[in-house]
Structures are given as structure tokens and as C-alpha cells.
Image (cartoon, helix red, strand yellow):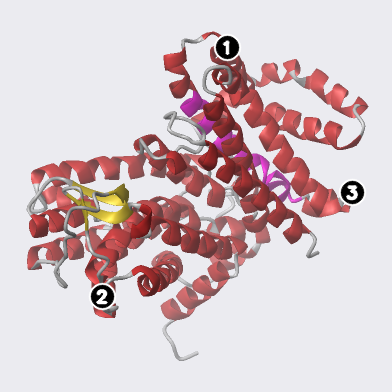
Amino acid sequence: MSSHPLLLLAANEVRLRLRRLSTLAAVLAVVAVTWAMISDVRSGSSLLVVNGARVLYTSSALALGSAVMGALLFSLAGFYLARGRTGEDLRSGIGGVIGATPAGDALLVASRWLGAVGSLVLLLGAFMLTTLACHLLRGEGPIQVLVYLQTYGLLLLPMAFFCASCAVLCDSWSPLMGKAGDLLYFVVWMSMLSLGAAVEEGGAASTLAWLDFTGLAHAMNGLRSQVDTQALGIGMMNFDAALPPHTLPQWMWTTAMVRDRFLSAALALLPLLPAVLLFHRFSPDRVKAGRARRRRSPLAMLDGWLRPLARLVTPLMRLAARTPGPGGQVLADATLVLVSAPSAILALAVCLIGGLVLPSVVLPGLLAGALVFWGILCSESTTRDSSAGCEGLSAAVPGGIRRRFLRQWAAALLLGLLFMGPIALRWSPAEPVRAFALLGGLVALSGCAALFGQLSRTPRLFLGLFLFGFYVMIQTKGMAMMDAVGFHGNASLQSAGGFLAAGLAAVAAGIAWSRRG
């Protein structure tokens, strides 16, 4: 008890975050993503490609390539993983106790920030350990731990600071505690990626480089300074095996780059200032327990205006009541989602009509919009019982937790078929593989939504990973495994079957987890 109160509170924050099932799911996801992105060169693709030739898998190459890919993933998913502690305190009733303590606002906010940073750093540690394991199997040179630590520290720590700062700000100000904060950060993340491209064009010495919290532009400029070319690729890139491979130097970071990354880390703390000034301190006149998960986005306002549309689907409830067995339960669950979010009824009508009558060239754009809306909708529907505090009630009915999980997965899949099924029908005569890819992707995404919702009891784990995957998918062309729903038409029978198998595996994992109780 002789430690400083800030350190005690921060350590407690880290422990509480590590006890979440979402943290375990995030670690497993990190391991899987890391293993997948460091391609075996025997497959014809490499993590780093320069002028069509691969870069040898030395410590500097694997550290730089994995850190860049990690920055893309963690800069979005890290925010959603760092959020939620304030909502937990409100729902458990401990928020009022915390607000009544003599601890100052700055101390409470700083401890939350340190706890968020600590949990993210531990996830980054798991990410680095997995990369080191890949180095043992696929590397081409000795493991140089200091090279990894330097690269990860310079590229990923400012990003972790910024994610934690934004998460604490959204949890400290009542208007941003719901979906408004989630969607606002997604816009900020997209802007950061655009900023990175602008910095890359203007050079790393640009003042904009200080706001490049992801470090992507710094990494690309550092790589270009070593190979003196603009033809670079990072990710699962194909290469010409006939060309001699490149070798990166052991130390790549100049003094100017290190200075810019330290300045970025300092600027990443700026959101903490308004967080302290706007901190609600769990005051009941500024934030209420019931508002911890209440939507405060424009979508919520739209749902209020469109509430009369809910009457259009109420006959489905009567049909579900007359339908025996699991079929009626799944229909009732899907209808409840539509009744709870009337904007989904309008979006569903647009997707049904558009999928049947719009020209074929417009269908990918319609698919993208339908997929995003459906993903956000399912992130909430698979955690609805937990949000409403009726998990025990739904688990006590016949079938218990296992049937509830299957019902939520089937309802998510049913809604996905309603939103995107017409597009699959349009593709099936001329492009059957593409239509099959759409169905396989829906099975996989529905399984992940139900599984992650059951493990974390919060929509943010699936939502963060889904939005990141969607962004990567629309930006990547020519790769079958990155075309999860046939968006670009690059999916193959093998990739579609792989996503279908992954979805069924997620369902099996959810069933196994539900039986533990």
C-alpha cells in the first residue's frame, strides 16, 4: 500500500481488463492474424516486396512489416477494446462509490488511461511474441530482440497512447459513451489513414507527420530511404522468385524519425485534457446507468422517427408464435431486431428492391452498404440479452444458453440473407462462385458475431474487428482470401469454402463454450 495511488488504480484497471473474455478472444485473434499475415515464401507471397522481389525475412524486415500491419489492426480494434470500463462501473453500481471518493478527476482519468495503455501493450506483447515464433519457423537470420523492441516501440506505442486517450475521452463525456463515440472514432481512424498518405507524399519531415499516430507514413518513408524506389508492397504480396531478394539493414530509424515519433506520442495525450475537463464523475445528473449502452447516434434519432414502420413487421411475430420449434424462435428473434431498429426495415426494403432491379455494376456498392449496416445491427443483436440484463432469464428457458446462441446466430444469418440474398440470386446464374462466396462469408461473419458476442458480452469486439476487416476488404483487390463476400469478384471456390468452414467452426466453438455452464 506504499505505492502511489495512481499506480495502484492503474494496476487494478489492467487486472480488470485482463479478466474480460474479450481480452482472451482478442489475444487469440491477434495470434491468428499474425500467423496469417506473415506468409510462407514457398507459397509465392511475402510480407515485404520491393520492385517485384521479396525482402529477406530478417529481424528488421519482419519487425517493420508486422508493425505496419499491426498498426492498421490495433489503431482501430484497440480503441474498441479499450472502451467500456466506465459503462461497467455504471451498470455494477460501483460508479457512485468511485465518484464519492476524494480522488481527483485527473487521477481517475489518468488511471483509466494507464490501465488502457497497459492492456494494449500486453496485447502488443502477444503480437510480438507470435511474430518471434513465426521468425523461428520462417525467418532468415538470427532473432534480434532489440530490433523488434525498437521498431514496435516507435511505431506502435504512439498509436496505443492515442487509442487509449480517445477511449478515455469517450468514456468520460456522456454524449460520446454510446454509438456516437464508436462511429466518431471510426471517422477519425479513416482520417488518420488519409493523413498518413498525405504525409507520405509530403515527406516524413512534414509537420503533419506529428499527427500520424499510426506511424504508417514513417514506416514507408523509412523503407523507401533504404531501397530507393517507390515500388513497395507490405502485406501478403506476390513476388517474382527469379529476382534476387533484398536485405534490409539492421537499424533503419534516423534521429529525425525517432524525434517525430516521440512528438507523436506526446500529442497523443491531448485528448486527455478535455477528458479531465468533461469527466462526468458518475454524477447522476450527467450520466445514468441506463445510458451506458444507450444509442446516441443519428441512427437512434432516425429509429425514433421511423417507429411507425415497426407495425409492418408485427405480423411476423404472430407467425413466429404459430411456428413450432426453433424456426419460430429464430423468426421471432430476427423480427425483434427489426422492431427494435425501425431504420433496419427501411434499409431492408432498399436492399431487397435494389438487389433485384439495380444494374449489375451497382451491386458491389449496394453490397458494401448492406454489409456495413448488417454488421452494426448484428453486433448489437448478439449481445442484446446481456445489454438488457436478462441473460439469466433467457438461459432458464428450454434449451438454455446453447439454444440461445444458435438462435442468435441463425437470426443474424437470416437477416444477412434478407439484406444480401437478392444480390446472391442475381449473381448465381452467371457467377455461381461469387454467389457462393457471399453465402459463405455471411455464415462466417454471423458465426463470429454470435461467438464474439457470447465471449465478450459487448458489441465492440466484433464491431471493431468487422470494421477493420471491411476496410481491408474494400482496399484489397486480386486476392481471393481477402474477398470474403465476393465484393470484388476475386473469390474462388477454395476461399469461399474456407470461409464457410470457418463460420461453422465458430458455431461449433460457441456451442462448446455454451455447454461449459
- How far from the left and from the top, in percent, is residue 380? 62, 41
Q: Which residue is mark 2?
A: 141
Disc 2 packing (10 Å; few <14; some 14–19; many ≥20): few
Which quadrant: the C terminus?
bottom right
Q: Nearer the viewer, mark 2 or mark 1?
A: 2
**In the rendering, which numbered label is found on residue 420?**
none
Question: Looking at numbered disc 1 in the image, what kind of residue is underneath it?
Answer: Leu
| Any part of residue 342 in sight | no
Decide whether residue 377 is among the magenta residues: yes
Disc 3 packing (10 Å; few <14; some 14–19; many ≥20): few
Quarter-wise, where is residue 148 in the image?
Answer: bottom left
Observer-nearest residue: 242 or 190?
A: 242
Q: Is residue 264 left or right of residue 329?
A: left
Task: Name the residue rendered at 35%, 35% in the picture.
Answer: 477
Observer-nearest residue: 1 or 456?
A: 456
| Any part of residue 473 in sight | yes
Disc 1 packing (10 Å; few <14; some 14–19; many ≥20): some
Residue projecting furthest to the top: 357
Task: Name the residue rendered at 67%, 61% in the picture.
Answer: 92
- How far from the left and from the top, in percent, is residue 234? 27, 51
